Image (cartoon, rainbow, N blue to C red):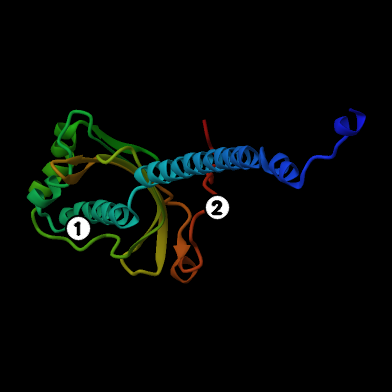
Amino acid sequence: MNQLAFRPTSPRQNVHTKFSFTPLTEFSSLFIAGRQLWLFCGLFLTFLLIILSSCKQTSANTPDEKKLQAEKDAILAVIEKETASFFARDYNAWKSTYAQTDYAFQAWSNKDGTFDASVGWNGIDNTVGKYINDNPEPQSSSHPIVERKNIKYKFYGPDACYLTWDQFNSNKQGDNFHHSKEVRLMEKEKGEWKIVCVAAFWDYVNPIAADRLKDIQRMDKESRGTDKL
């Protein structure tokens, strides 16, 4: 009985015992590896979707540079047309550059320290428009050379833009320039830019020699007055 009790198993039995659970073990390993792979793929796809969504949103919020430059060029063309048509005494062309609203505004400083201002299109038309009609002969500009530098644009949606710049206005001889700080507010009406606000602050006291102008990109000293409020 003791010999039978401690009889070694047969080789066939050993083989069966050794490999009886191997398929289940391999299946478990493959199942765990598969779960890990799916988890990795899921995380990767989620991360990829977040990146693509972010890129799409950034692209949607970033205006096309060519279109933006085209808008800037169109705005500047209207500003230049307003000035040119004034001196050409072309009333209709000058009028077409303005938004003819009750909140349109125009103001500039004078040599004697005063300023002129008009609020609303009727006010602008009754001053500048009347001047054009009362003096119909085309004139050469009192400032034949005008250079604009340091132009800053700020768009408020597709139909409104604020801009400011340093402007240098020559005398008739072209050997001296006066600096003015310019402000414009533009609105788009039926696809065309119109002037809503004109503000020009001139320094008549400190002329700039023409040979210095090429080295000036902007005016660092904006406060030059001595007798202030």
Which residue is labeled 1 in the image? 84
Expressed as whole percent of the image width and height from the top left, the position of residue 189 reads 16, 40
Image point 51% across, 67% down: which residue? Answer: 215
First reached walking from the N terminus: tag 1 or tag 2: 1
Q: Amino acid at mark 2?
A: Asp
Expressed as whole percent of the image width and height from the top left, the position of residue 116 reads 29, 38
Can residue 197 be seen at all in this image of the molecule? no
Q: Left of 11 or right of it: where is 227?
A: left
For the residue pair 185 and 31, the one nearer the viewer reads as: 31
Count of marks overlaid on the render: 2
Q: Quadrant of the N terminus?
A: top right
Image point 53% across, 46% down: which residue? Answer: 224
Expressed as whole percent of the image width and height from the top left, the position of residue 210 reads 44, 69
Which residue is labeled 2 in the image? 220
Disc 2 is placed on an element classified as loop
For the residue pair 134 and 95, the one nearer the viewer reads as: 95
For the residue pair 63 and 156, the one nearer the viewer reads as: 63
Q: Amino acid at mark 1?
A: Ala
The Cα–Cα distance between marks 1 and 2, rounded to whole angstroms, is: 29 Å
